[in-house]
Image: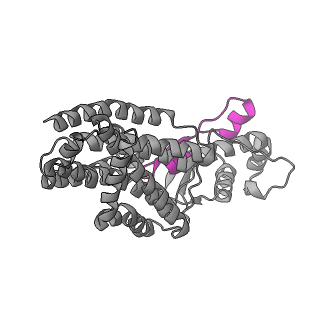
Amino acid sequence: MRSNWWNIAKLELTLALRDREAVIWSLIAPIAMAAIFGAMFGGDEAPAPTRVAIDAGVNPPVVAKSFENMLVQRGFEVSERGIRVELPDSVLDHLLDGRGVSARIVKKDESDMRVMAVSSAVREIMYVLAFRAGELKARADGGAVEAMGEARGPLVVHATTLGAAPKIPSGKEHTLPSMLVMFIMFQLTTYFLVLWVDDLKTGKMKRITMSPTTTRDILLGNVFARLLWAAVQVIVILGVGSLVLGVRMDVAPMPFAIVLASYMLAATSLGLVLGTCFKTPEKANATGVIVGLMMAALGGCWWPLEIVPGAMRMVALALPTGQAMDAIGELTALGPAAPFPLRNVIVLLAMAAVLLPIATRRMKIQLAN
C-alpha cells in the first residue's frame, strides 16, 4: 500500500520511455540543437575579443597610450568603435592630488557582460595609474609618448572585484544550458500534460482510484515521475554535452544543482496545473507546445536576457524559465566565485508553493468527477 505512489510513478515513466518521439524530443533534440545553435554563435571557440574605444579628451597622449596598451594586454581589442571608455580631464592631476578618478563606460549594442568586463579592467588600470601617475606626468611634460606596459619596474598591482570580471561563454556553453531549461519545460507542458489528459479520458486514472490506491498516491506518483524524468534530462544532456560537444560547465556544482532542482519543481507544478485545464489530448498538446515555446523565448532560452528591454526582462523574471536562465547566466559568467543565487531559488520555490496546491486541488476534483 505504501509503495503505490512509486508504482504509479514507474507506470508514468514506462509510458514515457515507450514513446520514441518523447525520448527523442526530450533527450536527443536538446543536444542536437545546442550543437547547431552553438556553432551558429561561435561553437566551442573563444568569443571574439571585446572592442573598446578610448576617449582620452584633453589628457596627454601618454595616458591614452597607457590605457590602450594595458587593455590589449588583458585581451581587449582597441579600435575606433566599440564600448567607449571616456576619461575625465586631468586624470594625472587628479591622481597626484589624491582626488580620485571616475571613468565613464558607454555602451550601445554590446552585451552587459562585456561592459562589466571592460569596467573591471578599467578599474584595475586606474589602480596602476595611481601608483605611476608621477612617472607618467614626467613623461607627458617631457613630450615622450611611451607605452605604459613597456616600462620596467618592481611595482606589480593586482586588483580584483567581487566575483572577478565575468567570463563571456562560447556559443555551446550558452546554448546547452538554454536547451536544457527549454526542453525540461517543453516536455512537462506537452507530453506529460497530454499523458494526464489521456489517462483521464481513457478512464485509467478512474480505475486506479477505485482500487486501494489513494488520491494522494496518484498525485505524488505523478509529481515524482515528472521530477525524475527532468532529472534524467539533466544527467543525459549535460553528460553527453560534456563528452560529445566538449562543453565544460565551470560553475559551483551545489548552487547549480539547487537552481536546477528548484526549477524542475516549479516547472512540474506549472505542467500539472496546465494538465487540469483540458479535456482532450489534442487541445492539450497544441496549447502545451505554444506555452512551452513562449516561455522558452520570453525566459531567455533563445537569447540572453541582458539584451532585452527592461519591461521584457520583468516579464521573463515572472516565469520559471526566466528565473532559471537568470541564475544560470550569472553562475556561468562568474564561475565558481559566483554568489549563491538565493533570490532566484526563493522565487522558483515560491512559484512551486503557489502552483502545486492549485494543481493538487484541481486534480482531486477531476478524479472525483
Residue name at image x 47 percent, y 61 percent: 236
Give, as a single range, the part of the protein colored magenta. Answer: 87-116
Q: Quick one: which residue is furthest to the right in this view?
A: 154
Magenta stretch: includes residue 113: yes
Please name the residue shown 51% across and 37% down the image.
341
Q: Position of residue 265 (x, y in %)?
A: 39, 41
Question: In the visual, does 299 lie left or right of 254?
Answer: left
Mark count = 0
Q: Is residue 319 visible?
A: no
- In this view, the residue in front, 206 or 361, is 206
Most foreground residue, 168 or 16: 16
Left or right side of 297 for 126: right
Considering depth in this image, is 94 or 119 the residue closer to the camera? 119
Residue 284 located within the stretch drawn in magenta: no
Residue at position x 29%, y 39% from top?
213
Image quarter (top left, top right, bottom left or bottom right) of the C terminus: top left
Image: 305 above or below 51: above
- Residue 65 location, quadrant: bottom right
